[in-house]
Image (spheres, grey):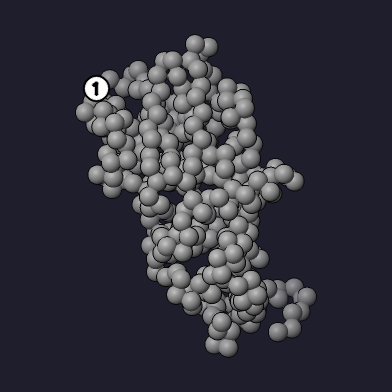
Amino acid sequence: MPHDSHDHDHDAHALLPPDPALWVKALETLLSRKGYVDPAAMDAILEFYEEKIGPRIGARVVARAWSDPDYRAALQADPTATLAADGLLGRQGEHVVVVENTPEVHNVVVCTLCSCYPWPLLGIPPSWYKSDAYRARVVREPRKVLAEFGLELPEGQSVRVWDSTAEIRYLVLPMRPSGTEGLGAEALAAWVTRNSMIGTGLPERPA
Amino acid sequence: MSDPHEVTRFDEPWHAQLFALTVALSEAGRFSWPDWTEAFGATLARHGLSRELDGGADYYAAWLEALEGLLARLDLAEPGKVEALRNAWEAAYLSTPHGKPVHLADEDAA
C-alpha cells in the first residue's frame, strides 16, 4: 500500500513492530504451520517464565537450607533430586549444583559461553549477567568485578568462579547473615537477594 | 545498586516470543538444549569480536541470528520462506487499520 510521508500517517494502520519482531513472527508462523511448534505451548512457556518463576523461588530454597539442616544436607548431597522433588527442576533437564559460601570461599556464577542460568530458581537473567563485560571479566578479575557490585570480600576469603553450561547450572548458597536468628522461613527468604544467589551480592536486610 | 529484590522481565515482547519459541522447539525435540547453547555461544562469540555486547537488544539480535542459522542447518525453516513471511507480516501490519487485529492473508500460506 502507498506509504505517505504525511504527519500522522502512522495512525492510519496498525503500529509496525520493530524489524526483528517481524522475523520472529515469520519464524513462528512457518514453524507452527509445519507443526514443529505449538503456539499454545509457547504461551504456556511464557506464562511459566514470566509469572510463575523468579528469584523468590531460589530465596525460599536458601532460607529453608539455612533453617533446616536435613534439607541442607539433602541439597548438598543430591541437589537435582532434592529440587526435583519440589518441582523446581529446569525444563531443559539440566542438573543443578549448589555451591556453599564459607568464611574461606566465596562463590560466583557465570556462563562464559552464553547465558546459562538456573531459570527455575532465579527467573530471567538480568542484563549484566548476559553482557560481554561480565562474562569475560568475572573469570579474569573476579574481585574487581565484585567490588563494582559493591561487594568487598575480606582478604582471607578466596573467590571461586563457576562456569555454567547447558547441562549444569549453579546456585550459590550464601552464608546466613547475623541478625537473622529466630526468623521464620518467610522472613528469612526476604533477606535472600537474587545477586546473593549468583554470588555478586550478599543477603541484605529487607527494606 | 537497583532494588536487590527486583525481578527481571523481558524488555520487549519479541524478546519474550523469541525465548518462548526457542524453548518450545527444544521441548518438542527439534533440537537439544546443548545444541542450542552451542550455536548461540558461537554467534555471541563472533559478535563479541567486533563490538561489546551489552546483554540487552544486542543479545537478542544475536539470539535471533543464531536461531535462524540453526533452523536453516537443521532444515526446519528455509531462509527464503522465512523472509517471504517476514515481508507478508510487514505488509499485513501496513494494510491493517489501526486498532484491528493483524492477520496474514490466506495466500501468504507457506
B81 left or right, relative to A54? right
Q: Which residue is mark 1?
A: A182
Location of the C terminus of chain B by quadrant is bottom right
Residue A205 in view of the camera: no
How crowded pointer 1 is (Cα within 10 Å; few <14, some 14-19, many 20+) is rated as few
Residue A192 is situated, as x and y percent measured from the top left of the image, at 38, 31
| In the image, residue B17 above or below residue A161 | below
Identify which residue is drawn at 55% across, 84% down: B109
Location of the N terminus of chain B by quadrant is top right
| In the image, residue B73 above or below residue B57 | below
Query: Which amino acid is tagged 1?
Result: Gly
Residue A84 in view of the camera: yes
Residue A55 is situated, as x and y percent measured from the top left of the image, at 40, 41
| In the image, residue B25 above or below residue A29 | above
Identify which residue is drawn at 75% across, 46% down: B50
Residue A118 is situated, as x and y percent measured from the top left of the image, at 42, 42
A34 left or right, relative to A69? right
Identify which residue is drawn at 64% across, 51% down: B43
